[in-house]
Amino acid sequence: MFNNEINEQVLSDLISSKIQSRMVVAPFARIDETLLGTPGDSIKVPQYTYIGDATAVAEGDEVSPSDLQASTTTVTVSKALKAVEITDEALITGYGNPVGEAAAQISKSIAAKLDSDALNVLLTATVKFDGTDNKIDYAGIVSALGMFNEEVNTEKVMFIHPEQMTDLRKDADFISADKYMGNVMLTGEIGMIANTRIVVSNKVKKDEENGTFTNPIVQLQVLDEAEAPAVTVYLKRDTNVEVTRQALKRATDISVDKFYAVALSNDSKVVLAQFKA
């Protein structure tokens, strides 16, 4: 059979790895596989509130226990699906590697969908910094970072719109990524400012009516394995590749899907910084 020339298992492994490497959200999102194969089209996600700092207690005295409070958010499972048709002519007479190109573009397409969902989820965060009187700059970013109320400075990423890139690059405190090439860890990372990694994405929200950008800033570091990250991607079915032969057309379809849900799992790890466009 002709479709044996396109190995489904090899394609599946290749596309799955490419999706993970192309995801901008991967470094700060936790991939949860506990729901793989389970029924249901929605997921209830717990969101815990902080119990407060510990207090000093004298010998023999009792401490008043704090209530562990949590709210739940329900997220709906999504299906990301993309398909490419490759004709026999393309396989036999075409230049390049049609199958490899199809795998690359499908993985990019699905990764972009997950990134869009993750950035949309980030925009539901409740902590906001209003810097709309000015364009994005060092002073504004530092003020926004102050809203994390950190005692220890942790690694963060900030997503900016391409139109903001020139303003940041002109800032004397901006460190271009080519100055630390060995330490670039995020897809799309162009540099750092105020110890925060800057990633450019055209998915960043621009409010045309008000002339403002909303730039999510996310804490990357999870200090405790039990601590929830900013975003969790719950997989219901991981990358699934199907190769279908269309004999009458002398063509082969490659289709890929991924069933998942994206949730804001730790609101305290996100600050939405708003700046003038």
Image (cartoon, rainbow, N blue to C red):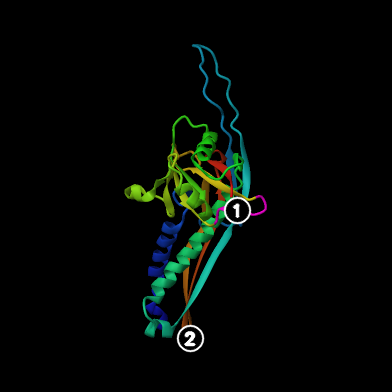
Q: In the rendered structure, are the residues bearing label 2 and label 1 in contact, judged by CB atoms less than 8 Å apart?
A: no
As helix, strand or loop, the secondary structure at mark 1 comes to strand
Looking at the rendered structure, the kind of residue marked 1 is Lys
* Residue nearer the viewer, 253 or 22: 22
Residue 108 visible somewhere in the drawing: yes
- Tell which circle, 2 or 1, labels the residue nearer the N-terminal end: 1
Q: Residue at x 43, y 69 (%)?
A: 103
In magenta segment, residue 209:
yes
Looking at the rendered structure, the kind of residue marked 2 is Ala
Q: Is residue 56 above or below residue 125?
A: above
Indicate the position of residue 12 as horizontal and vertical percent values.
42, 66
In magenta segment, residue 189:
no
* Residue 8, picture quadrant: bottom left
Q: For label 1, count other residues whose C-alpha is less than 10 Å away and answer few (under 14), some (14-19) or many (20+).
A: many
Comparing labels 2 and 1, the label whose residue is closer to the camera = 1
Residue 108's tag is: none
Residue where numbered disc 1 is placed: 206
Q: Residue at x 46, y 64 (%)?
A: 108
For the stretch drawn in magenta, what is the main secondary structure?
loop
Q: Is residue 134 above or below residue 94?
A: above
Segment tinted magenta in the rendering: 203-210
Indicate the position of residue 189 as horizontal and vertical percent values.
43, 51
Residue where numbered disc 2 is placed: 247
